[in-house]
Amino acid sequence: METDEVDTRPLDELLDDLYHGQERISQVDIYRRAVAAELPAQLLSRLNALPQGEYAVDEVTDLLGGSAG
């Protein structure tokens, strides 16, 4: 378990944008968009660690520790 606090706001903003009008998005697409948005390395590592598959926004935020704002 990571003890370092990571600012998840950039991730939350990215997910809000990605999931606008979408119910499920693949891990690969989320990761690609995160790289393009130049998210911090710690957040990219978390996204890269997600198992392949499609996720609803609440599933992603639960797994990554963000908020489903």
Image (cartoon, rainbow, N blue to C red):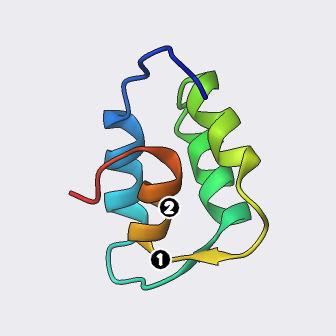
Q: Residue at x 42, y 42 (%)?
A: 11
Q: Is residue 39 above or below residue 62?
A: above
Labelled pair 1, 2 in contact (Cβ < 8 Å): yes
Q: Position of residue 59 (x, y in %)?
A: 48, 68
Q: Is residue 35 above or below residue 38?
A: below
Q: Residue furthest front?
A: 1
Q: Quadrant of the C terminus?
A: bottom left
Q: Position of residue 36 (x, y in %)?
A: 61, 42
**Residue type for callout 2:** Val
Task: Work out how far the residue at label 1 is from the one at label 2, CA to CA, in angstroms.
Answer: 6 Å
Q: Secondary structure at mark 2?
A: helix
Q: Residue at x 51, y 47 (%)?
A: 64
Q: Position of residue 29 (x, y in %)?
A: 66, 64
Pick whichever, 31 or 50, lies toward us.
50
Q: Which residue is mark 2?
A: 60
User: Is 42 placed left or right of 60 in the picture?
Assistant: right
Q: Tag 2: Cα neighbours inside 10 Å, few (<14), some, or many (≥20)?
A: many
**Residue type for callout 1:** Ala
Q: Which residue is mark 1?
A: 56
